[in-house]
Image (cartoon, grey):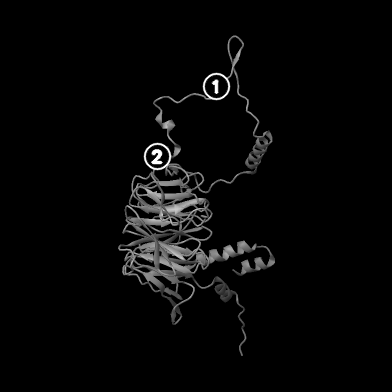
Amino acid sequence: MWKDIRDREAGKLRPNSFANRVKSDRTSSLQLSNHKDIVSPHRGSVNSLQVDLTEGRYLLSGASDASAAVFDIQRATHSEGLIAKHQCIFAVDKQHEHGHKYAISSAIWYPVDTGLFVTGSFDHHINVWDTNTTQVVVNFKLPGKVYRTAMSSLATSHMLIAAGTEDVQVRLCDISSGAFSHTLSGHRDGVMSVEWSASSEWVLITGGCDGAIRFWDIRRAGCFRVLDQSQSQLGRRPPISGWTANKLSTSKSLLASQGPNMKSRIPHKKLGNGNATKPSSTGKLPAKGSTRQRLHPGLLSGQDRSVSHYGAVTGLKVTGDGMYLLSAGSDSRLKLWDVESGCNTLVNFETMRLQTNKPLQLATSQDSSLVFAPCMATVKAFDMWTGKTSLTLSGHYEGVNCCWYNFPDQELYTGGNDRQILVWSPSRNSTELDWESTADKDNWSD
């Protein structure tokens, strides 16, 4: 740590690199917090956690006792010795006039404002709540149990909630109109996980109980990609070489110089008498029996039977840069996918045991170097590219369902079947440890 500080002072280390190193060191030293405690009001398993994306201050939780709660993680309600206790600011449960009747499976914040939050439940309803009045402002009735809901943090043109249910169709709920905008058909079984792209507000990723992961452009019919575990590439995407980049730029400049009015030459076919015939611009028509060629590409993708996992896809997480996708399945496998090519990167994550009967909430560190996955009663942190276990966090008494990594504080929040919400904070500052080991110790005494 002191070496990094000296390099930063000397100008050998850039500010961003120095900050990333400090954050990485703090993340790699996570342990059960001994100074912060979340007092859970839930009487059932905690299924969903999220810290708001605007202030990074309010933690939202949803549980199987049909209750949702909001906590202020920056200001404690009271202290017991050195431990700051954080009780919920408010909670809504079955006793509420418009509360859910069955388990809340998903609870998310409205991406650009803490004035709204969204809950999805096994009672077939999605509620949009006003945080200030704790009243339901919009309600959606769906055809089955709601497994997961998601909203795009990039969206500026829509206010859509993507809902994955036990029905085969993915539904998009429009908050502004209070109705379903449209449905996405392609899965052959229920949809347990939904995730918006981190690079486009129009791209949605869904994982179904049929083992398929599908990519949708919500402006077009049908999905445009189905991930296949048999299509693979080894490791990271190869960088574009300088020669290739120059060649691409040269070809683009040539095309631009030709202009849009430049017609391409069409070769003429010469006959035996020396005359030439011009080929028809229409080309060959497809045969009468070739119905597959006439189908829309989106409809063709619905016939794709490719699978990503041997079992249900229980969790999805897009990395912060939007280049890679993590998926968890009921086959107890964690896989890393290249979003651009749609290939499995073949990262061999170490042996783990995942819950198979409910959706899981994955998390990644800020630089996407670590992925946090609930593994029964523990949370394991895997290196993104080697697949090796970096940390094993043990503290829950029963299975862990969800985890959320808070970027500003480098803290991890986890919820499990033991009804508890645990906080994992960086251990003693590495600066203090280095200071103790390198501090000048005098040999004289007074």
Amino acid at dot 1: Ser
- Identified at 49% across, 24% down, the residue is 284
Report if residue 315 is visible in the image: no
Q: Which residue is mark 1?
A: 280
Query: Is 372 or 269 nearer to us in this picture?
Result: 269
Residue 191: image x %, image y %?
A: 36, 51
* Marked residue nearer the N-terminal end (2 or 1): 1
Which quarter of the image is occupied by the C terminus? Answer: bottom right
- Identified at 65% across, 66% down, the residue is 8
Indicate whether 15 appears above or below 249.
below
Indicate whether 225 appears above or below 397.
above
Check disc 2: other Cα within 10 Å, few if <14, some if 14-19, many if 20+. Answer: some
Residue lying furthest front: 177
Is 178 positioned to the left or the right of 237 in the image? Answer: left
Query: Is 315 or 175 nearer to us in this picture?
Result: 175
Marks 2 and 1 sit apart, C-alpha to C-alpha, by 34 Å
Which quadrant holds residue 396? Answer: bottom left
Residue 253: image x %, image y %?
A: 67, 38
Query: Is 264 or 370 nearer to us in this picture?
Result: 264
Check disc 1: other Cα within 10 Å, few if <14, some if 14-19, many if 20+. Answer: few
Residue lying furthest bottom: 446
Q: Which residue is mark 2?
A: 304
Amino acid at dot 2: Asp
